[in-house]
Amino acid sequence: MRVVLVTGKGGVGKTTISAASALRAAEIGHRTLVMSTDPAHSLGDAFQVDLGDEPTPVLPGLEAQQIDAQKRLEESWGAVRDHLTELFDWSGLSGIEAEELTVFPGMDELFSLAAVREHVRSGRYDVIFVDCAPTAETLRLLSLPEVMAWYMEKMFPMGRRVAKVVRPVISRVSSLPVADDEVFASVARFYERLDGIREILSDPDVTTARLVMNPEKMVISEARRTYTYLGLFGYAVDAAIVNRVLPDDVTDPYFKRWREIQQAHLEAVEESFADVEVRLVRLFDEEMVGIERLRRVGEELYGDDDPAGRFTTSRPFRIEESDDGSDVVLVLSVPLAERGDVDVARHDDELFVTIGPYRRSFLLPDSLRRREIRKAVLAEGELRIGFGSPG
């Protein structure tokens, strides 16, 4: 079983890459599902077919699905939302402001990703391609089940019992809304849906992410930061896909400067994503929608390779806590490095690691950006860079 998360900044062509990858996988014999968790769905437009909340056959061996995130959210969060709305209304905040505060950013896609678990468990598919929303923020929320586990095991049952006792008392002396059994049941359903998603998506033997970008400075910076975030939360990346690269047969002088700029950006991509497979897709002279055009994209992107395969198996870096819990440690695999060859420097939110003639840079996530480097230690083929507590 394979799950491939296709993510990147909005407008880079994630949906086209997702659809083309799924089509290619199906045509070489995999039972394939491609699903969109992006609230602004365009997967149906890519295939030029009508898609809904349930998997829809596109071709033999290929199904596609556009998740109705609002429906999924309503099923698991509706009663909690209504209760929070009551609380806000009781406190004096009402109307649209109260409703907006009851749903946290990223929750809609989070519930969409819960469908991945259901499909994995069903055994109906060999590979699932997920056209993610244009952000990696939701992947942060996948740590929520771990955070909630203690609460669900220890405090949740107690809270449920206490609510039953105090509800009649409070109702006689105050108009404060107290959660009823439906609210607690809704929280339980919420946790049950999330439980197991992270286990699937953080297993590198099952799930890998592919970062899609265009050869543009801001887009590449976003992809680099996403790459670091994915590593931070334990998700494997097996490919970086650069879409809309000017082809060699474009020789018009007008594009000469553009070609030079793109070449510099491609070199930056090779440097920043040196540990994963980098694949290029040229800029086509037409909109790549419909089965035949998507097939061309898939052929150019994968050649004779299997889209369901893992293009990179190594885990080049990871982020963990120090033994005493005081530091956050960025761990890089550098099996052949010598102590005198290594240099670590930082400028603002960018970390530079130089090993001999090679330099690697990382855009630091918010959690590390607020921390100062305390030490860097090279031992047993690993470079461990320790970041102290936030200043």
Image (spheres, grey):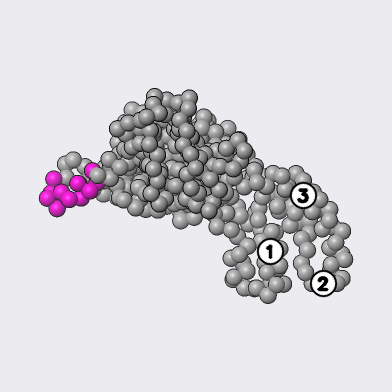
Residue located beneath label 2 in the image? 174
| Amino acid type, callout 1 | Leu
Q: Does residue 92 sit above or below 391 in this rendering?
A: below
Query: Closer to the N terminus: mark 3 or mark 2?
Result: 3
Q: Which mark sits nearer the N-terminus, 3 or 1?
A: 1
Residue 155, numbered circle: 3
SS of the residue at dot 2?
loop
Closest to the observer, 75 or 276: 276
- Per the model, the C-alpha gap separating discs 2 and 1 is 17 Å
Q: Does 58 sit above or below residue 165?
A: above
On screen, residue 185 versus residue 342, left or right, reads right
Q: Count neighbours of disc 1 (C-alpha within 10 A) and say few if under 14, some if 14 to 19, many if 20 or more.
A: many
Magenta-drawn stretch contains 253: yes
Magenta part of the chain: 251-263
Residue 84's tag is 1
**Three-letter code, disc 2:** Ser
Residue 176 placement (x, y as % from top left): 77, 69
Image quadrant where residue 193 sits? top right
Q: In the displayed structure, would residue 221 be above or below residue 97?
A: above
Q: Quadrant of residue 202?
A: top right
Q: Residue at x 55, y 57 (%)?
A: 105
Displayed quadrant of residue 196: top right
Sooner in the amino-acid sequence: mark 2 or mark 1:
1
Q: Which mark is residue 229?
A: none
Residue at image point 84% right, 68% down: 171
Q: Is residue 92 left or right of residue 316?
A: right
Residue at figure coordinates x 64%, y 43% from the top left? 146
